[in-house]
Amino acid sequence: MRGITEANLRKRAGARSFERGRGCLDAVSGVEIGDGWVRASVHGTERYEVEPALEEPGGPTGTCDCPYGVEGNFCKHLVALGLTVLARRAGLPRQRKAARDRAQHLDGWLSALSKAELLALLRQQIYEDRQLRHRLELKAASARGDLAAVRARIRQLLGIGPFARHTESPTASLPSAALAESAQCRASVGVPGPIHLIRLRMANRAFG
């Protein structure tokens, strides 16, 4: 947790976002601490998924799927979670060790499954998790080099309809994991990145 200090959070976010983040502490929920990562939800205008990096020597970084965070800014939600982590830092070593143990046990269990068992497990997860299914469909379309299918999956992940309002943030409801997957797949087939997503929304009819 070398990069996360109150002073670094203030410097990285700026005074305004830092103070707004301090006011969001009660909005932080579902904190998960892993080995080198932490995730939580922060409730603002909507519920945002937030993940600061714990081991960045150059200062705090992280991701948040709020509109301001998607633009690459260190938002108030990251500040709120960073301050929450600082308040719990005494218990971090124990929680990180527990996370390592869980990951090792999970990896051991998965490694012991046959190919058929793994496929059955994956198919069950795809059936139960719509976002996971969409992300895997995006990966499959990317592997085929199917640009039209990649664009269709991105529109689906973004919730773009034929009469989408152009004033909406195109990534406001996109989970951070889905955004990362779509960015990776867009890059592999030449689809525009996040700064062009508004144009993608406005050009939706042309894609279909």
Image (cartoon, grey):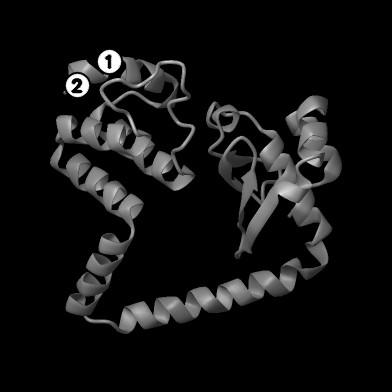
- Can you see residue 58? no
Quadrant (top left/top right/bottom left/bottom right) for the C terminus: top left
**Which residue is painted at 30% across and 65% down in the image?**
125
**Which residue is painted at 71% across and 35% down in the image?**
76
Residue 103, numbered circle: none
| Most foreground residue, 150 or 23 | 23
Residue bearing mark 1: 203
- Can you see residue 11? yes
At numbered mark 1, what does the secondary structure look like: helix, strand or loop? loop
Q: Badge 1, how many Cα within 10 Å: few under 14, some, many 20+?
A: few
At numbered mark 2, what does the secondary structure look like: helix, strand or loop? helix
Q: Is residue 58 left or right of residue 136?
A: right
In 3D space, how far apart are the residues under numbered discs 1 and 2 (Cα atoms)? 7 Å
| Up-down relation of residue 76 to residue 133 (above or below) | above
Asked where in the image residue 15 lies, by quadrant, the reply is top right
Q: Is residue 120 left or right of residue 83?
A: left
Residue 207, numbered circle: 2
Estimate the x, y position of residue 29 in percent, counting from the top left.
66, 55
Which amino acid, mark 1? Answer: Ala
Estimate the x, y position of residue 111 in percent, counting from the top left.
33, 79
Which amino acid, mark 2? Answer: Phe
| Up-down relation of residue 155 to residue 25 (above or below) | above
